[in-house]
Amino acid sequence: MKPAAPAPLLAPGHTYATVTDHISSMVLARTPRWWTLAFAGAFLLFLLFLFAVSWLFTKGIGVWGVNVPVAWGWAIVNLVWWIGIGHAGTLISAVLLLFRQEWRNSINRFAEAMTLFAVACAGLYPILHLGRPEVAYWLFPYPNAMGLWPQFRSPLVWDVFAIGTYATVSLLFWFVGLIPDLATLRDRARRPLARIAYGVLAMGWRGSARHWHNHEAAYLLLAGLATPLVISVHSVVSLDFAVSALPGWHTTVFPPYFVAGAIYSGFAMVLTLALPLRWAFKLHDFITPRHLSAIAKVMLATGLIVAYGYLMEVFMAWYSTNPFERFVTVNRATGPYALQFWLLIACNVIAPQVLWFRRARASPKLLFALSLVVNLGMWLERYVIVVTSLHRDFLPSSWGMYSGTIWDWMTFLGSIGLFLTLFLLFIRFLPLISIFEMRALVPEAKRAGEAP
């Protein structure tokens, strides 16, 4: 029996004109009321972030819950969490482009934007955690009269270079992909100011064969540059922990384990954003069940890798016969933070097993709920790694407890407001789906519509 053909990535009935009209109208039409309400809420959270940071700069990081022995708290937890969220955009855009996976076409544009805004939120936390943010520029190797250069054996400097490189390449990759669509908006905009703005950003694009040739060459080159960054950036972040001699951190499994966890949480955030956008802009023809199923399968695969990493941590603590490593492992499961530990196991290991079932992968409501659960679980994972490895030192006299203060909460929720503010501005003024890449799927949709 001949197997059934896979569902098309673009609903049948669409033409080049309908694809262009639908996507460009989301930008050029009047501002929806729901967008105004959502932006107002996000901007209020962003103002909360500004207030919390102003208070932090006035009083110092003592307003946070960090203490001795837990000198790393929510700031580093949130850094790793935001960097992880930023991984899905580069993976979807660069790696899947090189492998010619066309299901990326509907989600790569807003996933790339998500990467940029998540990295922006992540980059703020090391600066806030310095205690002296006014001298953060000392981390960069700039020529100076005093002959001061960064200490390249410091993981803090590694973060600066890794995050800076990742943000720069991701920004270039995102902008190069936008150029043809900016030219489309330039040609369709009715307001003179909009035509000028889009025209300047389109950089003289006319759609000639030479323009398309140069665009494709640059796009593939940047994809090749961005692909190693998917692995290198979160590996460098994991080395902040792995290079220490602290039980619970000193383990070689961290780099691949962190990368898998980053892709896991990143795809969960893609679902968290894609499903409301699919409903609000009526994008069911563009983000089809086939896309949701592909994202769910990637989440299931990376979730299993993360579960394997948890198992290896326990196994290596037992196999090493190191009493301190064994203590940290037992303390995580039975100590004061056992609730957080078992909650992360439930969120990251148990809950995603429903994705084995096709019906679960086809349910937008279930996928949205699961994406929120995974995002919570990945934040708890970073919390458990940071806090439970620090709060009980080698000497019982050095033991202590840690919990975030109201200022930790305000800073974290405010960073979410910053992310949502930037993302809402993006979907209002730029196309959240790539027009020229979706037009490439029109022949497939046409064949699907003509099939009996």
Image: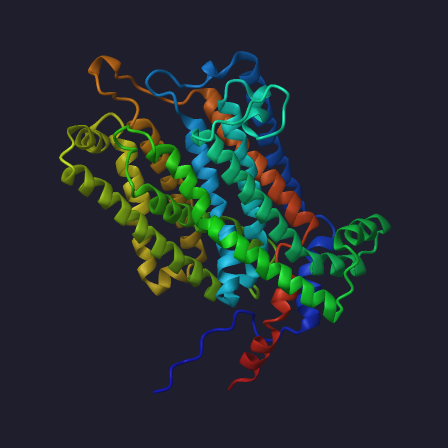
Residue 271 appears in the picture as rendered: no
From what the image shows, is residue 5 above or below residue 47?
A: below
Q: Quadrant of the N terminus?
A: bottom left
* Occupied quadrant, residue 185: bottom right
Residue 234 appears in the picture as rendered: yes
Query: Horizontal placement of 126 versus 340: left or right?
Result: right
Residue at screen point 41% across, 46% down: 262
From what the image shows, is residue 340 above or below residue 175?
A: above
Q: Position of residue 198 (x, y in %)?
A: 77, 52
Q: Position of residue 377 (x, y in %)?
A: 36, 41
* Occupied quadrant, residue 18: bottom right
Is residue 399 or residue 213 the one in the foreground? 213
Color encoding of the figure: rainbow
Residue at screen point 48% across, 48% down: 229
Residue at screen point 29% across, 41% down: 252
Query: Horizontal placement of 15 versus 398: left or right?
Result: right
- Report how many numbered discs are placed on residues in the image: 0
Query: Horizontal placement of 440 versus 406: left or right?
Result: right
Residue at screen point 50% across, 29% down: 125
Query: Horizontal placement of 302 versus 276: left or right?
Result: left
Is residue 418 or residue 247 the one in the foreground? 247
Q: Position of residue 390 (x, y in %)?
A: 30, 24
Q: Where is residue 190 in the image (x, y as percent from the top left)?
A: 83, 56
Is residue 238 or residue 141 the one in the foreground? 141
